[in-house]
Amino acid sequence: MRIVYNSEQYYVAEYPGAQGLELVDKRSSRGTFFQGDVADKFAEAMNQAAGEEASTEHIDAFLDNFSVLLNLPVVYH
């Protein structure tokens, strides 16, 4: 696992062995997992958003667009 992005509101972790990305909203304790082509497209879009403006506010606003997909509760083991 490699943390790709971490702010007060979100974190994005990469799982290279699973070809996946996990997006978690820290405020709601909910997340989702993108895998394969979907993970690649998400990473592309995130890199493009960061290229436009690399501020935390801008990237968090970009990640806000995925809130409807955050349907998995975060469970700590």
Image (cartoon, rainbow, N blue to C red):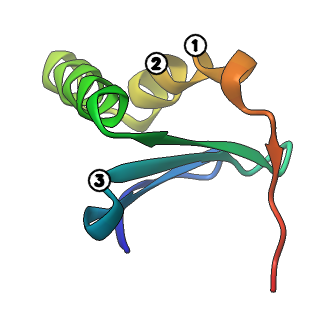
For marks 3 and 2, give the one nearer the viewer: 3
**In the image, farthest residue toward the bottom:** 77
The residue carrying pointer 2 sits among few (fewer than 14), some (14 to 19) or many (20 or more) residues within 10 Å by Cα, namely some
Amino acid found under the numbered disc labelled 1: Asn
Residue, disc 3: 19
Where residue 53 sits, quadrant-wise, is top left
Q: Quadrant of residue 65?
A: top right
Q: Amino acid at mark 3?
A: Gln
Q: CA distance from mark 3 to mark 2?
A: 22 Å
Residue 57: image location, x then y, percent: 47, 28
Query: Which residue is depicted at the point 62% across and 52% down?
Result: 8
Rendered position, 53 above or below 8: above
Residue 29 image offset from top left, x and y in percent? 83, 51
**Mark 1 = which residue?**
65
Residue appearing at x 33%, y 33% in the figure: 55
Q: Which quadrant: the N terminus?
A: bottom left
**In the rendered structure, which amino acid carries the disc numbered 2?**
Phe
Q: Are marks 2 and 1 in contact (CB under 8 Å)?
A: yes
Q: Which mark is residue 62?
A: 2
The reply to whether dot 3 and dot 2 touch (C-beta < 8 Å) is: no
Q: Determine whether, in the image, residue 30 is placed left or right of residue 50.
A: right
Is 34 situated left or right of 72 in this image? Answer: left
Closer to the eye: label 3 or 1: 3
